[in-house]
Image (cartoon, rainbow, N blue to C red):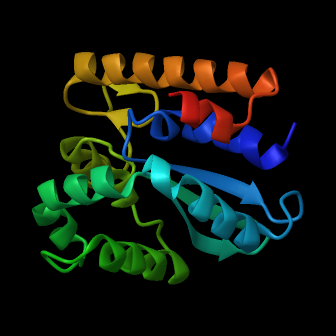
């Protein structure tokens, strides 16, 4: 079983199956050698499925990989453009422009750029409340800290769990992501 595919199955299943605009996975550079080449190969292989892969940060021994659906993510970021602008993102910028800005924010070091939650399809109100309250006082903690609509978040968490279970089961049975996504 390929370690890279197992990580994608475990941490990116909702995006792989189209239930979420993007997921982020942290990879140990020593355990996943030649990561840049792998990312390029996956981009070629999965572009027709509406998926893209980009390294956001190679921070010491860890690399942050964003797995995303460009059309969904672009739509999401347009919808929350006013919120992104609060974090210094150019209003009306392209998806590539926003990703470049996020990479730059990660490279600066210091405080983690919590607006990444918008890229990960978290509700804007929850992202803003998290920043405002420093992560304290949430109503529910799951894939993100929920400050707003708990029932909607619970429903999404159940959906994301089901995606993860489905994809992990398939990969554990020897089905590659390419085979799974062609069947989906």
Quarter of the N terminus within the rendering: top right
Q: Horizontal and vertical percent for residue 129? A: 24, 46
Q: Is residue 84 left or right of residue 136?
A: left
* Residue 51 visible, this orientation: no
In which quarter of the view is residue 54 placed?
Answer: bottom right
The image shows residue 70, relative to residue 169, as above or below, that is below
The image shows residue 89, relative to residue 164, as above or below, that is below
Q: Residue at x 68, y 64 (%)?
A: 41
Q: Residue at x 65, y 41 (%)?
A: 178
The image shows residue 15, relative to residue 139, as above or below, that is below
Seen from the viewer's position, the closer of residues 141 and 82 is: 82
Q: Horizontal and vertical percent for residue 40? A: 65, 70
Q: Residue at x 75, y 28 (%)?
A: 175
Q: Residue at x 47, y 53 (%)?
A: 48
Q: Horizontal and vertical percent for residue 9? A: 65, 35
**Labels in figure, total:** 0
Seen from the viewer's position, the closer of residues 95 and 89 is: 95
* Residue 122 visible, this orientation: yes
Q: Is residue 56 left or right of residue 135?
A: right
Q: Is residue 25 left or right of residue 33?
A: left
In which quarter of the view is residue 62 placed?
Answer: bottom right
The image shows residue 73, relative to residue 37, as above or below, that is above
């Amino acid at each position: 079983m390929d370690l890279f595919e197992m990580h994608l199955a475990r941490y990116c299943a909702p995006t792989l199956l189209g239930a979420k605009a993007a997921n982020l996975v942290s990879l140990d550079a020593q355990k996943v050698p030649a990561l840049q080449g792998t990312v390029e190969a996956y981009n070629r292989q999965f572009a027709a499925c509406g998926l893209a892969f980009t390294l956001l940060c190679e921070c010491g021994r860890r690399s942050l990989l964003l797995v995303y659906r460009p059309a969904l993510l672009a739509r999401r970021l347009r919808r929350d453009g006013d919120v992104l602008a609060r974090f210094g993102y150019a209003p009306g910028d392209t998806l590539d422009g926003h990703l470049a800005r996020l990479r730059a924010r990660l490279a600066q070091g210091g405080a983690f750029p919590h607006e990444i939650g918008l890229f990960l399809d978290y509700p804007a109100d929850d992202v803003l409340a998290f920043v405002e309250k420093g992560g304290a006082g949430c109503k529910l903690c799951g894939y993100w800290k929920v400050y707003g609509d708990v029932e909607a978040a619970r429903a999404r968490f159940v959906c994301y769990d089901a995606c993860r279970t489905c994809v992990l089961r398939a990969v554990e049975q020897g089905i590659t992501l390419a085979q799974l996504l062609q069947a989906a």
